Image (cartoon, rainbow, N blue to C red):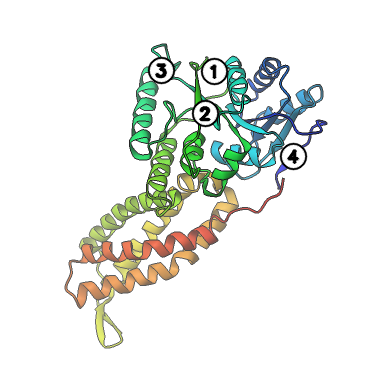
Amino acid sequence: MTNIERASAFTGQPDLSLIICTLNEGAAIRSVVTEISDTLAGISHEIIVVDDNSADNTAAEVLDLARTHPHVRLHVRVNERGLSSAAIKGWDIAHGKYLGVMDGDGQHDPKAIRALAEMIMKGDKDLVCVSRYIGTTETGLSGIRDLGSKAATWATGLVLKVPLSDPMSGCFLMTREYYESARPKLTGIGFKILLDVAASAPRKPRFGEVKAALRERQGGVSKLDLRVVLDLGALLVEKATGGLLPAKFVLFAGVGLSGVVVYTILLYLGHHFLTVPGQFPIYRYQYNKEDLVNYSLAIWLSMTWNFFLNNLITFRDRRLKGWRMFGGLIRFYIACSLGALISLCLSLFMKDQLHIHYVVAGIIATLISSVWNYWASTLLSWRDKKTGG
């Protein structure tokens, strides 16, 4: 299947293009779009719902609404996931002079968005956002989520010096010029798109903020989980290193470290419980068959572990399912075969010729081959989809 876009009857260039990213928001999306449409009355605008192929009635609700709201558009992405990448897709196909984003669950207050629109249309701001941390009023978050958000905000400001009181905000507007300046360096990773934009632009923005607490969710469920936290950490590393360490590589490396733990455990078990007599020659040297089998099994099983964890975390936006996942696993084995061979040969050489402890030798060899594995698996197993729309 390919991505699908339902164009509206709207013609010309609106002042504002507001993107709403959805995944199973059918219970709330109609009221959210209707409320924001009414609140923006008098401002030329379009609303683009970018839906990640929801399993519920989200797309049907939007299409039905568009029949009476010609400024509403729907773009359905197939086999793609993630709020940040969905927002970027929406902005790329938008027509407005000003670009914005909000959630589809009703937590963002339309009155605050109206205030943002009036602020940025004065022409002296590049970026304006809703902030939960202006003043001392309630944020609308539960205790643990509020504490986590504040901790993430503190870490973001410390690492990136982003001049915003709430860089975790999911509701903001910006000029098209500011977006286009940031576009080449956007990662599209995770859910914290404001952080991505503000850290990718070549200059600090002229910015403004409007205080607004989150409202009660009208439908759907929270998308916040451990993977969102991991995405944020990887994004911070990428931006802090100026792109030297891409976010996906950081996630891949983190998964790889868990794979090293699995690899080490398997090596230990094989060393103590596996018996394979005999030797085999490589060039001028003789190696134990037991070591060959032990290292090979540890490499293969840890490689399999890495695939499934990467599919769940690193490449969640391109997650493979069903037969596509089986095909991706085969391609992953092929992609990592050279790295596996390098790891195996280095392990044997370091253990027998350099007399390095068998576990240490295996870990060193695995780390050396990890960079190749990342690039090869990215190209073969989780390839970027060239889709239109």
User: Within the image, what quadrant is residue 37 found in?
Assistant: top right
> x, y percentage for residue 361?
24, 66
| C-beta proximity under 8 Å, tags 2 and 4 | no
Q: Is 382 situated above or below 166?
A: below
**311 horizontally vs 63: left or right:** left
Name the residue at 54% across, 31% down: 127
**10 horizontally vs 313: left or right:** right
Q: Choose the circle earlier in sequence order: 2 or 3.
A: 3
User: Within the image, what quadrant is residue 293 found in?
Assistant: bottom left
Q: Choose the circle earlier in sequence order: 1 or 3.
A: 3
> x, y percentage for residue 274?
25, 65
Q: Secondary structure at mark 1?
A: loop
Disc 3 crowd rating (10 Å Cα; few below 14, some 14-19, many 20+) is few
Label 1 to label 2, Cα distance in Å? 14 Å
Q: Secondary structure at mark 2?
A: loop
Q: Which residue is mark 1?
A: 217
Q: Out of 256 and 171, give the one closest to the viewer.
A: 171
User: Within the image, what quadrant is residue 38 found in?
Assistant: top right
Residue type at numbered disc 1: Arg
Q: Is residue 21 visible?
A: no
Label 1 to label 3, Cα distance in Å? 12 Å
Residue type at numbered disc 2: Gly
Q: Secondary structure at mark 3?
A: loop
Q: Which residue is mark 2?
A: 170
Q: Choose the circle earlier in sequence order: 1 or 4.
A: 4
Q: Which residue is mark 3?
A: 142
Q: Choose the circle earlier in sequence order: 4 or 3.
A: 4
> x, y percentage for residue 44?
73, 24
Camera-nearest label, 1 or 2: 2
> x, y percentage for residue 132?
45, 19
Name the residue at 62% across, 23% down: 117
